[in-house]
Amino acid sequence: MEFYHLRSFVVVAETKNLTQAAKRLCSTPPAISAHIKMLEQELETPLFIRSSKGMALTEKGQLLLSKAQKTLDSAIDMVNLAADNQDELIGNFILGINQNLQNLKGAELIKNLLEHCSGITLRFEQSSTGKIISKIHDEKMDGGYIYGNIPEGFTAIEIKQENITTIAPKCFESKNIITCTDLTKEVWITMDQYCPFDQTLKEKLGINIQSKIQSDNDQSRLDLVKDGIGLSFLELTTAKKEEEKGEINIFPYLDFSIPLSFVVLTKRLNDPIIKALLQEVRILWNVMI
């Protein structure tokens, strides 16, 4: 029985999909399928029920899964124990980001990985908190930065409390705003229904806000505000820089703070690549264990 056959089996069992398993293992669906077939032939029993909905474990497959996971965990522990450092780690990490890379110290993280874990390839994906959580849950993303509460099944490193403010076009007449009710009449550029920013906006102003424009990209929302389309929430540090340039106005009456965290799936904590990124993030942000 080959080690990589067991690993393919466990990942397919977790993702229930050959394509997703192949992406996670940096392989191809035919190769992963071949690993499963070889394992089934060796054990002389089917391990999955294949259908248009994906791969579901058989009863025998369920029995093998827990034992296979223990075997893999033991092997990983042995490798990590034997290694003096992380230089030998090879793999990809898809990292979800919910604000610009400069604020998230992206360049510093890359430099640290090149120095300590040169075999890890990092890929950034700009998105919103809700979408990042969904992709990590579905294992289409390995980890990411999110705002707000930590979902069940996730492990988090809280980075900081982020201050959020309202940005408005230069032409915006703040003197016309007397109460929060007046703000409901303004056009708002929002993120999406799963974003804590939008949830906070509704908590402060109610559900009857004018929001017909959505973008989960900070720069796109900032550009729309500059063009006079409407108002939006943005990180205070970024907003101040843009205000100093004379590009926008800051409207502070709805300001709030929210925790910013780096998260991964708890069930993937034994993955060496995940462990390495968690360590580098803790070092980057000076967060004690």
Image (cartoon, helix red, strand yellow):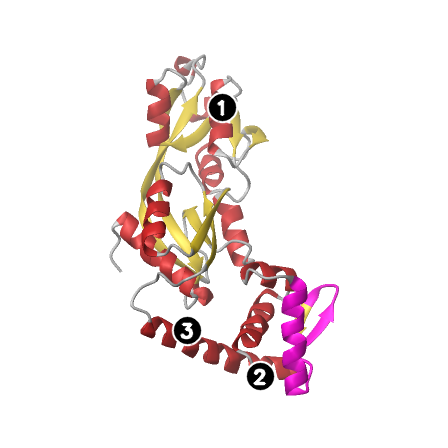
Question: Which mark, residue 19?
Answer: none
**The C terminus, quarter of image:** bottom left
Question: Is residue 116 rendered to the left or right of residue 145?
Answer: left
Picture layout, residue 66 above or below residue 288? below
Q: Nearer the viewer, residue 84 or 141?
A: 84
Give yes or no for residue 252 being in the magenta stretch: no
Asked whether the viewer can see residue 76, the reply is: yes
Kind of residue sitting beneath label 3: Ile
Seen in the image, is 255 located left or right of residue 43?
A: left
Q: Residue 193, relative to residue 165: is it above or below? A: below
Res 104 seen here: no
Q: CB under 8 Å between callouts 2 and 3?
A: no
Residue located beneath label 1 in the image: 223
Comparing 167 with 23, the one in front is 23
Q: CA distance from mark 2 to mark 1?
A: 54 Å
Q: How many marks?
A: 3
> Which quarter of the picture shows residue 150?
bottom left
Asked if the residues shown at circle 3 and circle 1 are in contact, with their CB atoms under 8 angstroms apart, the answer is: no
Residue 273 vs residue 194, the one in the foreground: 273
- The secondary element bearing badge 2 is classed as helix
Q: Which residues are magenta?
A: 29-54
Whole-angstrom CA distance, mark 3 to mark 1, is: 47 Å
289 displayed left or right of 135: left
- For residue 63, which numbered disc appears in the image? 2
Residue 236 pos. (x, y %): 34, 31
Residue found at x 37% / y 27%: 239
Q: Position of residue 231 (x, y in %)?
A: 47, 24
Mark 2 Cα within 10 Å, few/some/many (few <14, many 20+)?
few
Establish if 71 lies above or below 135.
below
Would you name the residue on which mark 3 appears?
76
- Could you say whether the residue bearing mark 3 is in a helix, strand or loop? helix
- Looking at the picture, does residue 190 appear above or below residue 152? above
